[in-house]
């Protein structure tokens, strides 16, 4: 699985969502997108579900960041 | 898979929060109208009918109206907590609060017991049920993050404020119930600190970094501030010890100063330095919070000002200065965001008919900058002149009320422009749900 990273911290809403969607447009089935975000992107989840993508969110208490891993195939 | 994921069935529609936001400047116009017609007598004492009426136009018609709208949007989108039947609840709550506020305002102005009774019936159940609904929705969502906790505490603050306020109003409505004016300070303290300030802290923790690209609030401040404020509020109002109340008042004032200072510092550290009107509304709001907290403390320990009622001045700074300014700034972020969200989501969700035209607005162009700048100017002029009017009654108050009237009419026009944009383009896309 190839890894692709996207850091959307410090971007003004709704730019993080637009950037993530932009990356997903070109995401291949053997790739995983790892997004680093200050907040949990609750608006993104229904879009991912609608498109049938898998995702997992982890919160890093120390850095106060969310890491959202997104891939097209089933986990 | 995340269990807190938002389902679009639970996502609020465009009008759920926006009907509240569009009503906010209407009550701003009403407040300006009362100040104009009163001609400045209201600054002589907080116990006169006009200042009580204006205070409730601000707290219910302007502040609570905006905060309820914001919560209808933020609960599902930011906290993953869905209010049951949000659209229906929003329509009913909006109607009851609008009608109830008008009843209460006219009840104060005309001193009509029946209107106080009507205001109690219209306002108390809906606000308590809303507060309880928020508490339950966040509890069910199982989120323990700072904003959600702050919103829960603020909902508790709202309930306490409304219970005391309802009891006070029943003293006006009926001769059977004694009018216990000593409770007024607790009603005001729970309203300003337990509801408005705690919610503002919770909301700013999300909104400031999200929309103004600032660093996050310091962890310690973030997690402890709202708990400390509520603890002090409880200690100061529940334990009948004068010394303890004094300590609580001093500490709450210090915490207000700390929150305002940290927010001003964060705003100075924005990652993007592009001119942003919300930034300036929040700066004015924080300066008013500092001044209001300081003057309140000064007045609490017996300080006086020549030609001015200290409690009227601190109330003016905390409500019309702090709360109204930050709400104004927040509306200029959240309304364009809602226009973007509701036009963009059907597109990214693939819910368009093949070949359907769609439009994705640039969030910075939903409301033009120049009209927002002009409105900001009238807001600041109105605020400065209102403060000056507390010291010098007369001609000044009419100019202040006119500036405030124009500020709110412009705010209404600017928000309506965003709504028109949504209406124009929403017809071209198929609704998501």
Image: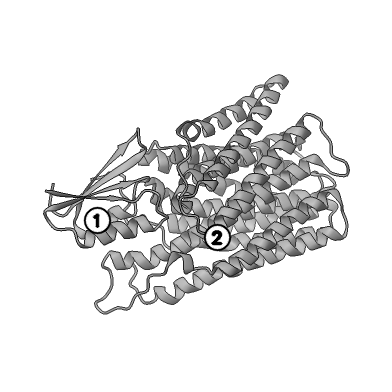
> Is residue B232 among the parts visible in the rendering?
yes
B211 left or right, relative to A75:
right
Residue B263 image label: none
Q: CA gap, disc 2 to disc 1?
A: 30 Å
- Label 2 marks which chain's residue? B
Please state the horizontal and vertical placement of residue A44, each as a whole percent of the image: 31, 54
For the point 78% across and 34% down, the residue is B299
* Nearer to me, B411 or B190: B411
Please state the horizontal and vertical placement of residue B255, each as a whole percent of the image: 60, 33
**SS class, disc 1:** helix
Please state the horizontal and vertical placement of residue B71, each as a whole percent of the image: 48, 50
**SS class, disc 2:** helix
- Label 1 marks which chain's residue? A
Please state the horizontal and vertical placement of residue B363, each as a whole percent of the image: 44, 64
* Nearer to me, B283 or B332: B283
Which picture quadrant has residue B11? bottom left
B429 left or right, relative to B127:
left
B46 left or right, relative to B274:
right
Q: Are marks 2 and 1 in contact (CB under 8 Å)?
A: no
For the point 65% across and 38% down, the residue is B164
Q: Are marks 2 and 1 on the same chain?
A: no
Q: Is residue B430 above or below residue B150?
A: below
Which residue is denoted by mark 1 in the rendering? A48
* Nearer to me, A31 or B396: A31
Q: Is residue B252 above or below residue B433?
A: above
> Is residue B121 among the parts visible in the rendering?
no
Mark 1: give few (<14), some (14-19) or many (20+) Cα within 10 Å: some
In this figure, which colouring scheme has been used for the structure? one colour
Which picture quadrant has residue B136? top left
Q: Which mark's residue is nearer the viewer, 2 or 1?
A: 1
Mark 2: give few (<14), some (14-19) or many (20+) Cα within 10 Å: many
Which residue is denoted by mark 2 in the rendering? B21
């Amino acid at each position: 699985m190839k890894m692709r990273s996207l850091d959307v911290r410090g971007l003004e809403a709704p730019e993080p969502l637009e950037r993530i969607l932009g990356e997903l447009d070109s995401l291949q089935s053997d790739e995983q997108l790892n997004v680093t975000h200050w907040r949990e992107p609750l608006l993104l989840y229904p879009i991912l579900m609608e498109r049938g993508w898998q995702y997992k969110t982890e919160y890093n208490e120390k850095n106060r960041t969310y890491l959202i891993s997104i891939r097209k195939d089933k986990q | 898979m995340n269990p807190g994921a938002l389902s679009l069935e639970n996502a609020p529609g465009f009008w759920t929060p926006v009907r509240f936001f569009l009503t906010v400047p209407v009550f701003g116009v009403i407040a300006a109208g009362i100040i104009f017609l009163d001609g400045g007598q209201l600054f002589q004492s907080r116990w006169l009918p006009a200042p009580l009426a204006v205070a409730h136009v601000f707290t219910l018609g302007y502040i609570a109206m905006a905060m309820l709208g914001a919560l209808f949007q933020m609960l599902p989108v930011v906290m993953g907590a869905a209010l049951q039947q949000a659209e229906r609840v929003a329509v009913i709550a909006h109607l009851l609060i609008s009608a109830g506020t008008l009843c209460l305002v006219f009840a104060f102005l005309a001193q009509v017991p029946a209107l106080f009774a009507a205001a109690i019936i219209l306002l108390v159940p809906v606000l308590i049920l809303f507060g309880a609904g928020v508490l339950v929705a966040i509890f069910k969502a199982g989120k323990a993050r700072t904003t959600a906790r702050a919103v829960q505490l603020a909902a508790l603050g709202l309930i306490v404020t409304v219970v005391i306020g309802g009891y006070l109003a029943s003293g006006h409505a009926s001769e059977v119930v004694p009018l216990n004016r000593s409770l007024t300070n607790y009603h005001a303290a729970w309203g300003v600190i337990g509801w408005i300030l705690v919610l503002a802290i919770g909301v700013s923790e999300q909104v400031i970094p999200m929309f103004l690209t600032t660093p996050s609030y310091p962890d310690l401040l973030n997690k402890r501030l709202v708990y400390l404020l509520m603890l002090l509020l409880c200690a100061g109002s529940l334990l009948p010890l004068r010394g303890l109340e004094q300590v609580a008042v001093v500490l709450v004032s210090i915490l207000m100063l700390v929150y305002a200072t940290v927010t001003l510092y964060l705003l100075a550290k924005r990652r993007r330095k592009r001119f942003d009107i919300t930034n300036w509304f929040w700066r004015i709001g924080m300066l008013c919070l500092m001044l209001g907290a300081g003057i309140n403390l000064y007045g609490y320990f017996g300080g006086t000002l020549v030609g001015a009622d200290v409690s009227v001045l601190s109330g003016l700074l905390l409500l019309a200065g702090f709360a109204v300014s930050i709400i104004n700034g927040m509306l200029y972020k959240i309304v364009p965001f809602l226009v973007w969200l509701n036009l963009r989501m059907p597109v990214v969700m693939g819910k368009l008919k093949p070949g359907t035209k769609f439009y994705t607005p640039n969030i910075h162009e939903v409301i033009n900058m120049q009209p927002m700048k002009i409105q900001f100017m009238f807001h600041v002029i109105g605020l400065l002149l209102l403060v000056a009017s507390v010291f010098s009654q007369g001609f000044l108050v009419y100019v202040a009320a006119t500036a405030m009237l124009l500020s709110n009419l412009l705010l209404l026009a600017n928000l309506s422009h965003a709504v028109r944009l949504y209406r124009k383009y929403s017809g071209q896309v198929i609704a998501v749900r």
